[in-house]
Amino acid sequence: MTLVAPPPIPRAAGSLPLLGHALRLGRDNLAFIAGLRENYGPLVEITLQPGTRTIVVQDPELIRTMLTDLGPSLDKGRFFEKMGQLMGQSVVTVAGPEHVRKRRQLQPAFGRAEIARYVDLMRGEVDSAVDGWTPGRELDVREAMVKLSLDMLVKTVFSGSISAETFAQLRRDLSVVMNGVGVRIMLPDWFEHLPIPFNRRFDRARDDARATINGAIAALQAAGHGTGDMLSLLMAATDESTGLPLTEDQICSEILTLAVAGTETTASVLSWVLYEVARNPAIESRILAELAEVLGDRPVAFADVTRLPYLDRVIKEALRLHHTGWLVTRRTVTETRLGDWTLPPGTELAYCQHALHRDPAFFPEPLTFDPDRWLHSEQTFPQGAYLPFGAGKHKCIGDRFAVTELITALATVLRRVRLELTPGLTVRPVARATVRPRTLVMTVRARAG
């Protein structure tokens, strides 16, 4: 029997010496990645770092294989290396046995009892935020959601112990670093060593963010007692390999992971949901009717998270149509078989949730925001076609926390105010470290009754 060799992996057009596909990505990275799905097959090669192959995996079954079956044998890859410039060695940036150890250390902070305790803190921050929105005035919704997400983070991670001034500085530093990470993913490594203002701002913001977190850790250590927040739980954890408490640097890395994952992604999803609700009055009416039926006049509580199925479908649809992930990576450590192809060690692998979730082969009318596409419990698409929180051993550790946070925030905001779009306005996505609205300004209207 003669084995048929697989077809060669095609190479995307437009690569340049020294820059690879950086210019194509810099012009419009989302359009470039979406074009790969339209013009190439299950695998396509692009160049992010000259001299290194990056294979974009586009077939759902191959993506599932990469994340689950091959997951334990792969390194995290380029995207997570760039994230590691901020976070250091955290649960998000490491792979293999070290990832397993770190995941076990963090898991207690995301248990059901802990999440339930956080809901009242989250809701209080949402109410405070809405109190500051003036009816009839325009609101930069993206900025408001970033601030709200950070407010909720400070309450759940630091018990609100960071001063307003320190909090404002941390917010600025994280914004600079996350935008910088998004740019560095697309550019060759040599760019990072250029003595230009962009790189100096990035390095300064990264160092200042870590210094802020280390200061909070030192203050809690000096107080000599825990406050029941995530920081306290991490300070009580031990390193499985040594049996010793986590070092200040280890704790700082994990807290920065929570800060990035808990602000950038949450703020973007909240912004997109509020945008779609404003565009679709029928969806808004159904959410409000469900909230009135389930909650009556009382505020949302942890027990309600599983009792709001329509709002849950709205969030699922936002995570499909407006997913925040545009380039997630892995890297082969040894010769690796992926489908019919054998890849050498050191091959970068990547997939794009944003493009994957908009593929008409899996989601009919993919650009239509339709929460009712999730009414049927049976899947009508391949297992690897919808990955809101990733899959396999590296699936997002905070998925339940994130959904709880989203439902709490949306249930509170939507009952208090109506956000009104300028008629005919279409909001465009922009991808940096995450996919977010380029600009999203809406007018605040008081909710009648």
Image (tube, grey):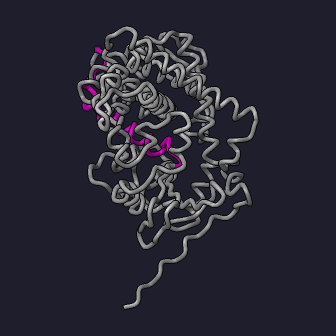
Q: Position of residue 10 (x, y in %)?
A: 58, 70
Q: Position of residue 60 (x, y in %)?
A: 41, 60
At a point 42% along the width and 58% down the height, the residue shown is 63
Q: Which residues are magenta?
A: 298-327
* Location of residue 320 (image quadrant): top left
* Location of residue 181 (image quadrant): top right
Foreground residue among 150 and 202: 202
Q: Position of residue 238 (x, y in %)?
A: 30, 29
Q: Is residue 313 above or below residue 169?
A: below
Q: Is residue 134 left or right of residue 283?
A: right
At a point 50% along the width and 44% down the height, the residue shown is 80
* Location of residue 371 (image quadrant): top left
Quadrant of the frame with the N terminus:
bottom left
Seen from this angle, which residue lies furthest right?
A: 196
Q: Residue 62: in sight, yes or no?
A: yes
Q: Is residue 112 left or right of residue 401?
A: left
Q: Does residue 254 show up magenta in the picture? A: no
Q: Is residue 393 above or below residue 175?
A: below
